[in-house]
Amino acid sequence: IRDGESYNLPVKDEYMLGIRFILKQLRTGVNINVIKIITPAEEQVFDANVLNYYEIENNLQKDDFAFAEIVYRIPVELLEEDPSIGLYKQVGSKWIAQPTERVDEKDGFVFFVGRPKSFSLFALSGAPTQLDCVPDWSCTPWSACGEENEGLRERSCLDIRECEISTPPLTLDSCQDD
């Protein structure tokens, strides 16, 4: 695939219609496969009602893309029930809403173009009901209780998943609460 050359890959699915992309520089041996996933691995499950999961497998790096688009459609009646339906991309342990533009409406469908920076695992879904990221806290043991600590014990905690929005577990506590 030449640099600056647009490439279209049609997809025959009830929701996803295709992907388009432009690469920054010449690449040979490019492989791209769009796979509809029926049941993803447990760590990949989105917590909202998912219409479909799609794995866009490829042998390219994020920096190879000058431009990437996913073209999809949603039935009008589904959008009337849940206007938050959109395109979400899994990045690490998080699901991130992708920039999307509504481009047309006809024959009972609303057509959209999502613009991810690269391809990986995607979900067409309503907005998540929980945080995009579920924290995984690792805490040091509680400090010793004693008069020098004024009846308090403490510990430090680190979120291994580095969720941006989360409430840490208790790090300062009364020694009387053993």
Image (cartoon, rainbow, N blue to C red):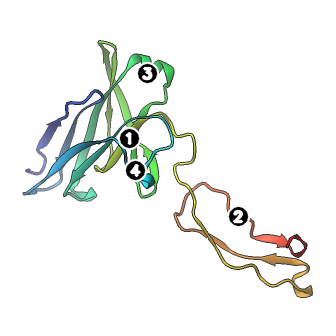
Q: Residue at x 8, y 50 (%)?
A: 1
Q: Is residue 170 left or right of residue 28?
A: right
Q: Is residue 145 above or below residue 109?
A: below
Query: Residue 78: which disc?
Result: 3
Q: Please state the horizontal and vertical placement of residue 100, each as a whole percent of the image.
A: 37, 35
Label 2 sits on residue: 169
Look at the numbered discs 2 and 1 and tell me whether their residues touch, using CB distance below 8 Å: no
The image shows residue 81 at horizontal and vertical percentages of 50, 21
| Residue 156: % across, % down | 68, 75
Quarter of the figure with residue 74:
top left
Whole-angstrom CA distance, mark 3 to mark 2, is: 39 Å
When asked about the image quadrant of residue 62, the answer is: bottom left
Residue, disc 1: 123
- If you read the primary sequence from the N terminus, does the residue marked by circle 3 or circle 1 appear first? 3
The Cα–Cα distance between marks 3 and 1, rounded to whole angstroms, is: 15 Å
Q: Secondary structure at mark 4?
A: strand
- What's the CA distance linking mark 1 and mark 4? 8 Å
Q: Compare marks 3 and 4 and give the one earlier in the sequence.
A: 3
| Residue projecting furthest to the front | 39
Identify the image quadrant of the C terminus.
bottom right
Residue pointed to by mark 4: 90
Marks 1 & 4, CB-CB < 8 Å contact: yes
- Residue type at mark 2? Pro
For the point 81% across and 85% down, which residue is it?
144
Q: Residues within 10 Å of mark 3 (few under 14, many from 20)?
A: some
